[in-house]
Image (cartoon, rainbow, N blue to C red):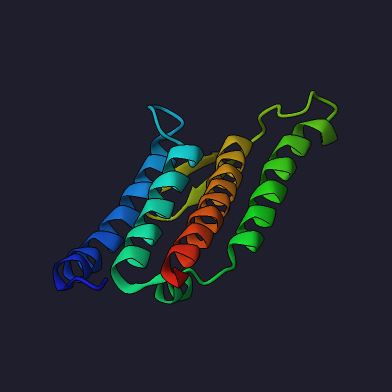
Amino acid sequence: MKSLILQTAARYLLPLLALYSVLLFLQGHHDPGGGFVGGLIAAASLMLCALAYGVPVARDVLPIQPRNLIGIGLLSAAAAGSVGTLQGKPFLTSAWVKLQLPGFGELELGTPLLFDAGVFLAVLGVTVSILMTLAEEEEEE
């Protein structure tokens, strides 16, 4: 079932939902949010695309296979946890780096951001993989 109203709404909502998922991801260190919620919102935007245009179009919107996203996310989270171990501290101990960026001032990046990015990618990959499989089966019937 293809609805012109749903397709038009999806065309405008997809970029907004993607931006909102990034906002939730970045806000997660100080307020509710983070990689898990951001990944779910990103997956929901892809499912909106699948509902409006079909699963093949939604698969084309995502440039990386969901299986690869899961692997990259798990490797990223494991790498973030291993940094503390390499420094002789317990697993998942935070490590921070201060960067001086022209025009932005000093920026402090740490392994929690890398861990959250891994969670974001893993949740996005798992959710999209499951929902796309279910949607494909529904289209076949």
Q: Is residue 84 left or right of residue 108?
A: right
Q: Which quarter shows the N terminus?
A: bottom left
The front one of 88 and 132 is 132
| Residue 86 position by quadrant | top right
Residue 98 screen position, x and y as percent: 57, 40
Residue at the location (32% across, 60% down)? 48
Residue 57 screen position, x and y as percent: 40, 76
Q: Is residue 24 above or below residue 50?
A: above
Q: Is residue 4 left or right of residue 110?
A: left
Q: Which quarter shows the C terminus?
A: bottom left
Taking the view exactly as shown, the residue that stands out farthest to the left is: 5
Residue 75 screen position, x and y as percent: 72, 50
Taking the view exactly as shown, the residue that stands out farthest to the top is: 90
Disc tally is 0
Residue 14 screen position, x and y as percent: 29, 62
Residue at the location (58% across, 61% down)? 66
Residue at the location (37% across, 54% down)? 103
Q: Is residue 51 left or right of residue 26?
A: left
Q: Is residue 35 above or below residue 15?
A: above
Q: Is residue 19 left or right of residue 87?
A: left
Residue at the location (38% across, 52% down)? 44
